[in-house]
């Protein structure tokens, strides 16, 4: 992740961790989101981030499937091209766009895969 997004790492959030009221094991995530000025936390782990814990920071919680659908709605050409391009990075074994979509579906984003497939 650091190689792909070098400017995305959040530092200096540790002092905020004790103030967070979400699940204890995930307080560092919310603290980093607050420190980094995030508007959204994207996670499959929705139950550990209750709305009451996020409300003071105006941070929205979104599952990956809905997040990807939002991105597709906002940037359809960019998202479709990305889904076509990413499989090219798989070398061992090589992956086709169709196989990549199947990997995405099995990873927990079936609505996104249904929406993107006709665009490929």
Image: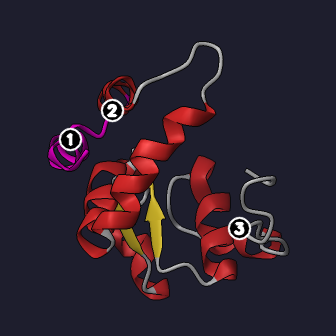
In the image, 6: left or right of 98? right
Magenta stretch bounds: 107-120
Compare marks 2 and 3 and give the one earlier in the sequence: 3
The location of residue 45, given as percent across then percent down, is 41, 46
The quadrant holding residue 36 is: bottom right
Name the secondary structure under disc 2: helix
> Does residue 50 appear anywhere in the picture?
no
* Residue 53 within the segment the image draws in magenta: no
Name the secondary structure under disc 3: helix
In the image, 12: left or right of 70? right
The quadrant holding residue 113 is: top left
The quadrant holding residue 20 is: bottom right
Residue at 31% x, 27% y: name it: 98
Q: Name the residue under label 1.
A: 117
Q: Mark 3 points at which residue?
A: 17
User: Label 2 vs label 1: CA separation?
Assistant: 8 Å
Locate the C terminus by quadrant.
Answer: top left
User: What is the crowding at mark 1: few (fewer than 14 residues within 10 Å), some, or many (at least 20)?
Assistant: few
> Does residue 45 appear anywhere in the picture?
yes
Q: Mark 2 points at which residue?
A: 101
Marks 2 & 1, CB-CB < 8 Å contact: yes
| Marks 2, 3: nearer the viewer | 2
Compare marks 2 and 1 and give the one earlier in the sequence: 2
| Marks 3, 1: nearer the viewer | 1
């Amino acid at each position: 992740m650091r190689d792909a997004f070098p400017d995305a790492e959040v530092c200096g959030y540790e002092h905020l961790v004790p103030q967070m009221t979400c699940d204890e094991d995930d307080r560092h995530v919310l603290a980093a989101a607050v420190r980094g000025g995030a508007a959204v936390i994207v996670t499959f782990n929705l139950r550990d981030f209750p709305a009451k814990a996020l409300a003071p920071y105006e941070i929205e919680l979104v599952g990956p499937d809905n997040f990807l659908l939002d991105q597709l709605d906002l940037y359809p050409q960019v998202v479709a091209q990305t889904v076509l391009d990413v499989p090219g990075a798989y070398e061992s074994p090589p992956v086709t766009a169709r196989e990549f979509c199947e990997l995405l579906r099995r990873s927990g984003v079936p609505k996104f895969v249904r929406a993107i497939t006709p665009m490929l």
